[in-house]
Image (spheres, helix red, strand yellow):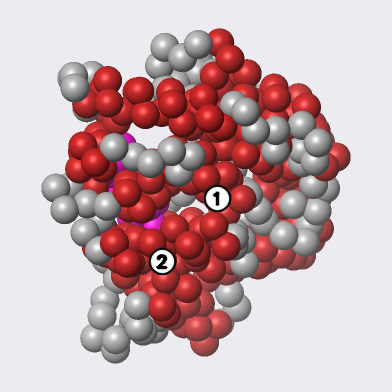
Amino acid sequence: MSRPTLVPLLAVALICLTRLAVAAPAIAAIAASDAPPTRASLGQFEHDVLSIVALRNEADRLAGAAVLARAVPDLPSVLTYQTFLARAEAAPGAGAAVQWVALGNCGKVGPQPEDCINAAALARLEKLAPDNAAVWLLAFDHARQRGDDNAARAALARAAAATEFSTYYGVLLHAVLETARALPMPAALVHVLAGANGNAYAATYMIAAGNVMYLPTPSLEPVFETCKAPGKDTARRTQCARIAHLLAWGDTVIARAAGLALQERLADGAAARARVAAERRTLAWQTQQFAAQVLQARKDRALAARLVQLVLQGGTENSIQLALLRGAGIDTTPPLDWQAAGQ
């Protein structure tokens, strides 16, 4: 429910796999860290980074530290996920992004948290971000799992009436990246994470992207199931169309892909379907090119520095992706002979 879910659409699945490929080098290095000296080097670096950030008191920065700490074993109590999260929630200016991190405060803490959700954090988000469709889609799924049809219908209506879809991806990627940059990374660790010719900009980005990938996010499969065949139910079709629009303009590549896929499903007529299909193809191209640029950044320090700069400037995953491609002089429209995988 609260983890990235592959909805039954190949294009969305491809986007998910591409995002995984971007973070895979760091994830693989972390997963292999049971063998010394890698584990000792990575663990010591993360411990030292968290020790520095523990002196800060900004809510988002502490939330970023909580995200990073969740994947680090054997930390002292003052540096754990639970401690950083509690401090973030109590810090001045703590808002919806902090509560989004708190959604994962359930089940077993670890690098890949259990598929659960903190109901108290969700309730707080409903008050803090009532115009965020992502919050209400979480509530929709939560109500469905409880078998509460009335609550599910109400949550779906609130999602359709919202003004945005945001998982606070850009804010939290920024916060985790700043945490990972709190200290210079040892050259040996850079080479483990980014390769023999790697650079610290790329290594810290991959650490941040790898950790943010496991933050809670609404499962979109229940929405697709609900909107699969609205038929002559005008109210349901209107709700589904509105949610599709919000997803298509959401803050992540996965949300945009899902929104476009839902718009294509709901489109009236061949012309409308063709237009949306073209947008989906363009998004698939952009995402493929972005992934290639991120992997290239491992051995291209200037490109990696630009990527980090874009994250620190703020924005959504979609805006960061487009800005990196444009800065690299890559056409954001696919060549006529390019074919997206699975099409």
Query: Residue 123 at x, y = what percent?
Result: 79, 31
Instruction: Using the rendered view, name the quadrant where residue 285 is placed.
Output: bottom left
> In the rendered view, does 284 fall on the left or right side of 125?
left
Q: Amino acid at mark 2?
A: Arg
Q: Which residue sits at x=25%, y=63%?
A: 300
Instruction: Tell me the distance, in whole angstroms, between the alpha carbons under discs 1 and 2.
Output: 14 Å
Instruction: Return the residue at label 2.
Output: 306
Numbered label attached to residue 212: none
Q: Main secondary structure of the magenta part?
A: helix
> In the rendered view, does 114 fall on the left or right side of 222?
left
Give the camera-side residue of 216 and 264.
216
Q: Which residue sits at x=38%, y=41%?
A: 184
Give the camera-side residue of 122 and 227.
122
Query: Residue 196 at x, y = what percent?
Result: 14, 48
Crowding at mark 2 (Cα within 10 Å: few <14, some 14-19, many 20+): some
Q: Determine whether 329 is above or below 265 in the image.
A: below
- Pick whichever of labels 1 and 2 is earlier in the sequence: 1
Q: Which residue sits at x=65%, y=53%?
A: 166
Instruction: Using the rendered view, name the quadrant where residue 10 is placed.
Output: bottom left
Indicate the quadrant containing the N terminus: top left, top right, bottom left or bottom right.
top right
Instruction: Confirm whether the magenta stretch covers residue 234.
Output: no
SS at mark 1 in the image = helix
SS at mark 2 in the image = helix
Q: Is residue 294 visible?
A: yes
> In the rendered view, does 71 fall on the left or right side of 229?
left
Instruction: Confirm whether the magenta stretch covers residue 21.
Output: yes
Numbered label attached to residue 174: 1
The magenta segment: 14-28
